[in-house]
């Protein structure tokens, strides 16, 4: 299996990386990645790749992300994953 090693800034924006047959098959970020962030990831993987997905569809600035990322991560992981427990 090839582990994808990203810069801390990119890694911070990624919610999940799925692997299939030892290769990255899907990358899910909290918000849509920019064209440049996608290009950086593709460059690291050194293959053609297009399976970028995001949890939220809104786009936010780097400044907005840095101000709210801890709240977003905490709320997303805390509230959304507890839904199964409430049912």
Image (cartoon, rainbow, N blue to C red):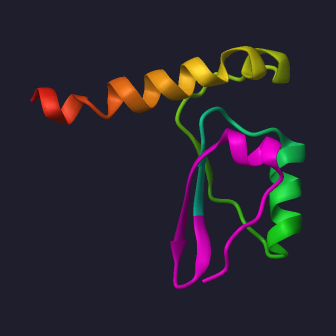
Figure label count: 0
Nearer the observer, 75 or 44: 75
Residue 7 magenta:
yes
Residue 22 magenta:
yes
Q: Is 81 situated left or right of 22 in this image?
A: left
Q: Quadrant of residue 59?
A: top right
Nearer the observer, 68 or 51: 68
Nearer the observer, 33 or 74: 74
Q: Is 86 situated left or right of 82 in this image?
A: left
Is residue 75 visible to the viewer in this orientation of the structure? yes
Q: Look at 54% across and 72% down and name the residue there.
A: 19
Question: Image quadrant for the N terminus?
Answer: bottom right
In the picture as drawn, the residue positioned furthest to the left comes out as 87
Q: Is 60 situated left or right of 14 in this image?
A: right
Q: Look at 73% across and 22% down and name the residue there.
A: 65
Residue 32, position in %: x, y? 68, 36
Nearer the observer, 81 or 24: 81
Q: Is residue 13 above or below residue 74?
A: below
Residue 27, position in %: x, y? 61, 55
Is residue 60 visible to the viewer in this orientation of the structure? no
Residue 5, position in %: x, y? 76, 65
Q: Is residue 14 above or below residue 45?
A: above
Q: Is residue 6 above or below residue 70?
A: below
Q: Look at 85% across and 67% down and name the residue there.
A: 44
Q: Look at 62% across and 71% down and name the residue there.
A: 24
Residue 8, position in %: x, y? 79, 47
Give the magenta-colored segment's residue range: 1-25
Question: Image quadrant for the C terminus?
Answer: top left
């Amino acid at each position: 299996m090839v582990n994808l090693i990203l810069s801390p800034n990119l890694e911070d924006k990624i919610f999940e990386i799925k692997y299939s047959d030892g290769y990255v098959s899907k990358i899910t970020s909290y918000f849509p990645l920019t064209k440049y962030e996608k290009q950086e990831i593709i460059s690291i993987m050194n293959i053609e790749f297009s399976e970028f997905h995001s949890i939220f569809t809104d786009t936010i600035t780097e400044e907005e992300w840095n101000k709210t990322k801890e709240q977003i991560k905490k709320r997303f992981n805390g509230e959304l994953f507890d839904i199964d427990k409430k049912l």
